[in-house]
Amino acid sequence: MDALNKTFERLGGVNLLPVALALVAFVLIGAPSSWVTLTVAGLAMGMMVFLMASGLSLVFGLMDVLNFGHSAFVSFGAFVAATVLAGLSGWLASDSIAMNAAALILAYLAAIVFGLVAGWFFETVIIRPVYRDHLRQILITMGAMIVAEQLLLALWGGTPFTVLRPHFLEGSWIIGDVSIEIYRGFAFILGALAYVGLYFMLNRTRMGLLVRAGVEDREMVESLGFRVDRLFIGVFMLGSALAALGGAMWAGYATLITPHLGAEMMIIVFIVVIIGGLGSIQGTLLGAILVGLMSNYLGFLAPKMALASNMILMVAILMWRPNGLRPAVK
Amino acid sequence: MTLLSLKNVKTNIGQYAVLHDVSFDVAEGGVFVLLGRNGAGKTTTLRSIMHLWRPSPGSITFRGQDITGMHTSDIARMGVAYVPENMGIFGTLTVDENLVLATANGKIDQTRLKWVHSLFPALEKFREKQAWSLSGGQKQMLSVARAIIEPRQLILIDEPTKGLAPSIVDAMAEAFRDIAKDSTILLVEQNFRFAKSLGRDMAVIDDGRVVHAGSMADFAADQGLQDRLLGLSM
């Protein structure tokens, strides 16, 4: 068994799972063009879910906080970005790619700034009094989620909100028989860039070292002379901003959003965090890609199974690795 | 000169009173050993000094300054290092990253690093290895190395020889002698032979109270006192 495990790790270990899943799907789907389209869609979905989940994973791992209110940042990020895009509809309709891109950047920046400010407020007012008390954390963050959803309803109404897309992200790239939606390609690239940035921050900076160390043993980090509570605020704000950015990107992907968007995404986000391993960015990425691919492949092969697919995936992975695929703490 | 002073320190963990009345002074320089049976309150004493558990009431002063209510990180920044019983190693970080984290500005003084490597050669060999893959002895070396990678006035070390092979214990004793030339060590230890070889002063804690304090030489010479205060567990 040990030899088998060693060989598996030498070949790439759990990183090979998305590849294995894609190969199995290739055989089952049969048509290469459909397989490419579904794979790109799965990767794009995975990257957007990764953005929403990475902050939750860090907050979970570092702060030991069960934040069910995380979905509020996703929803508000989506609505804030959609509102900015609606306000800049003239720029979006322009033939100038620069104008299009400027509107999109402003929309994403607005979502990120909202996430940072709301994250600071949320951590200071709601989370801080309930550190180390999971039951109260669940209750208070669930309450905050409900309040946030009602706030969204009050501000934007209950009818679905149409999200405008920049002109240059409309349409598809056609390569032979393969059709790839441009927005999905864009979402994949942006998500990958965010991952690289996060990876660099966590592995090449002192702040990242502290976060990784804090995930393992916060008491020891304090004994080395660092204020973990201040680090917590930074991580919480970063996590909230990432969730808001993920929500903003998802809004452009879905094009029609409701105040329930965050709550609907949270099930997937929690599954990703659990199967990836708490506090691990690499694990979160791996989990998000697996979930994205699985949803798209099964949505095509067995649509009735699509909803259950991620639950089955989670159960299977937890039976194999109870701490997730790549837990932060060894 | 007194470096650290505990006066009537009482510490509760939840509803349980663990330290009832702990008072002792640690003079500057050398090794001060805290002895006692399992569960006597030695670890709680170290954790109370670091404010990882809040002592109340009582007072703890370091270099004449009251640190009783100070935040752990501020106590550490005053020059107090802590090596916990579980070593507190960050397993997913490399050996070098563990050391870098213990520096104030993120830069390791190379002369100091050479000295640390001379004390613990294994750490030089495994600089880029993730700490979880080290052996128990190497992890203990890393834990101590992290405490001395920058000059500290006081180093609190909790049972460093627990579970280590005799050869590593001897190497550790040699390292502690070298470290104690520039820093003061407050050592919690169950291995009396090891403690005796290092300690200048000592105190015995029993049931959350200091029941004896004095010089290690006198205590080591009094077999009757050892039997009475430490029993067979040592």
Image (cartoon, rainbow, N blue to C red):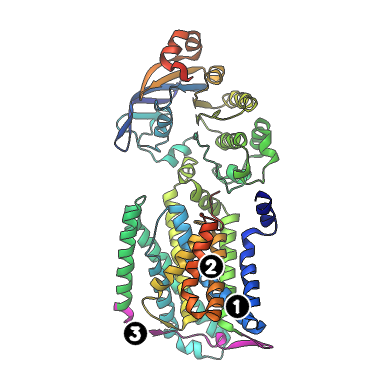
Q: Is residue B29 visible?
A: no
Mark 2 lies on a secondary structure that is helix
- Sooner in the amino-acid sequence: mark 3 or mark 2: 3
Please indicate whether residue B126 sits to the left or right of residue A248 in the image.
right
Mark 3 lies on a secondary structure that is loop
Residue B90, percent from left and from top: 55, 45
Q: Chain of mark 3?
A: A
The mark closer to the camera, 3 or 2, is: 2
Q: Is residue A178 magenta?
A: yes
In the rendered structure, which amino acid carries the disc numbered 1?
Val
Report the magenta residues as a range: A154-179
Could you tell me which residue is drawn at 29 percent across and 36 percent down?
B15
In the rendered structure, which amino acid carries the disc numbered 2?
Ala
State the mark number for residue A40.
1
Q: Chain of mark 1?
A: A
Badge 3: residue crowd in 10 Å (few <14, some 14–19, many ≥20): few
**Can you say whether B159 is above or below A47 in the image?**
above
Q: Nearer the viewer, residue B54 or B232?
A: B232
Residue denoted by label 2: A288
Q: CA distance from mark 3 to mark 1?
A: 30 Å
In the rendered structure, which amino acid carries the disc numbered 3?
Thr
Mark 1 lies on a secondary structure that is helix
Q: Quadrant of residue A87?
A: bottom left
